[in-house]
Image (cartoon, rainbow, N blue to C red):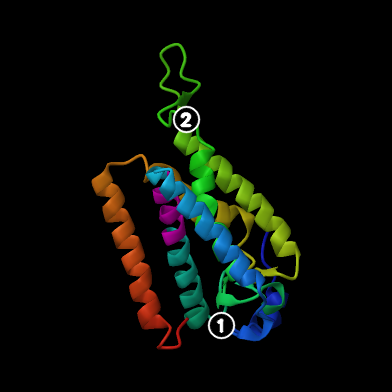
Amino acid sequence: MLFGDPANKPLVDAVKVRDPANFNWTFIALLAVVFYIYWTEAKNKNWKAIVAGFSLYSVHWFYEIMNAVIRHFAGYPLWTVTNESTTFVLLIGVSWELSMMFSIAGIISWKMLPDDTNTRYLAKNGRKGLDCKLVGALGMALMFSLFEIFLAWTPAFIWVYKWWGAIPVFITTYIPFFLASNLVPAASPKFQKGFLITMIGLDVLLLAILIPLGII
């Protein structure tokens, strides 16, 4: 499935956000795994990997908040997860399992780069070549977008708009996600701190305002 289908709207209408009815103990197991990964990186002083993880995760949460806002004002979100597919729906478009995956996706993307993150591919005969961080971000974005085609084919993940699908999600969503994970850790410490404080602060502020108002 490359694009959404309006026939899926009843499935979106049936979703209950933050309903504990399907809770099970894998919720705790996944949290423990994520905690272990971050603790191990901190113990090994792999600070850039941690910055990569939080950079992508903070952008991910901003997108999920905006997707929920779109649902409130337009009637339907760009993407939706179903209650039957998860232990807990956090926001209309993100389940606990997806959120835990995205919490470490930035670390994975950063670790997939060459040891020398200043490496440039095809830099021969005077050509500047291609920044490995940019190539890595595009590659990860493409892989995630292709996998999302499969997800949208299943009952677990729903697209309803005919104009929304694998191509828009590749360009507008996954490229920014992985640019954040690959570029922010390579920036100056001042920029890293500013980016994370801004994004995390914005996410927390929006959640604190919009959830009580019933918007998301």
- The residue singled out by tag 2 in the image is 115
Span of residues in magenta:
49-58
Q: Position of residue 28 (x, y in %)?
A: 59, 70
The answer to whether residue 3 is above or below residue 125 is: below
The residue at the point 68 percent across, 81 percent down is 22
Mark 2, residues whose alpha carbon is within 10 Å: few (<14), some, or many (≥20)?
A: few
Q: Residue furthest bottom?
A: 213
Extreme residue in the left direction: 190
The image shows residue 12, relative to residue 119, as above or below, that is below
| Residue positioned 35% across, 82% down in the render | 209
Mark 1 touching mark 2, by CB under 8 A? Answer: no
What kind of element bears circle 2? loop
Q: CA distance from mark 1 to mark 2?
A: 41 Å
* Visible residue check, residue 117: yes
Circle 1 or circle 2, nearest the eye: 2
Residue 94, percent from left and from top = 57, 70
Mark identifier at residue 18:
1
Q: Amino acid at mark 2?
A: Asp
Most extreme residue toward the front, as rendered?
Answer: 43
Residue at 60 percent of width and 53 percent of height: 167
Task: Pick the residue in front: 173 or 202.
Answer: 202
Dominant secondary structure (helix, strand or loop) of the stretch shown in magenta = helix
Q: Amino acid at mark 1?
A: Arg
